[in-house]
Amino acid sequence: MKYKLYILFFMFCLQKGLAQKKPQLCICFTEKTKYIEVNTSEDSTKTSFTIVRGGFETKEKRKKNLENYQAGPPSASGQPSFTINYYTSKRPERIDLINSNDECEFFITLDQFRQKEFGFPKGIGGSQVIFLKKLPDGSFLKWNPILMARE
């Protein structure tokens, strides 16, 4: 009986935690947006997003940053990362209006996201993002990817 109560309490807590939505950061982009590479499998079930970080747009900038890193003292954070990578194994959802999307606490463009000064708003972590791609007909494709670990 005691274990049943623990199990019921655990299930209640789990359900309550899942019911509360965390705020999401929605990153908007179009087909013409620079510095993002979107790779989708043939059947649209897998999509990866590679975003070039600000300050690393060209080979020259990447080389200079790498040289600065190698010339300085050893860093605990390791070699500079040129990209931020997200991945999802689910098909995108097509939505008509982003205003009707109550999951988004903040809307920003990809350029705003790439800014060095940009930090995630309070309560939003790096894996709590939604990508919204504006289509020519005015609708959007929506993905809920996860942040890939940095190697």
Image (cartoon, rainbow, N blue to C red):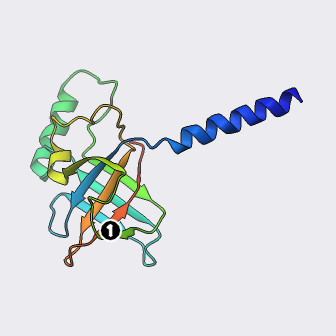
Q: Can you name the residue that lies furthest to the front here?
A: 100
Q: State the residue at coordinates (30%, 65%).
A: 38
Residue sitting nearer the eye, 26 or 40: 26
Residue 10, x across and y down, in percent: 70, 34
Q: Is residue 135 above or below residue 133?
A: below
Q: Quadrant of the C terminus?
A: top left
Q: Does the image show residue 34?
A: yes
Residue sitting nearer the eye, 68 or 24: 24
The quadrant holding residue 4 is top right
The quadrant holding residue 106 is top left
Q: Is residue 97 above or below residue 59?
A: below
Query: Seen in the image, is 69 located left or right of residue 8?
Result: left
Residue 92, x across and y down, in percent: 40, 67
Query: Seen in the image, is 26 located left or right of residue 43?
Result: left
Q: Is residue 34 above or below residue 150?
A: below
* Label 1 environment density (alpha carbons within 10 Å; few <14, some 14–19, many ≥20): some
Q: State the residue at coordinates (29%, 23%).
A: 74
The amino acid type of the residue labelled 1 equals: Leu
Task: Give the residue pinned by disc 1.
Answer: 141
Q: State the residue at coordinates (58%, 38%).
A: 16
Residue sitting nearer the eye, 147 or 139: 139
Q: Does the image show residue 151?
A: no
As helix, strand or loop, the secondary structure at mark 1 comes to strand
Q: State the residue at coordinates (35%, 37%).
A: 124
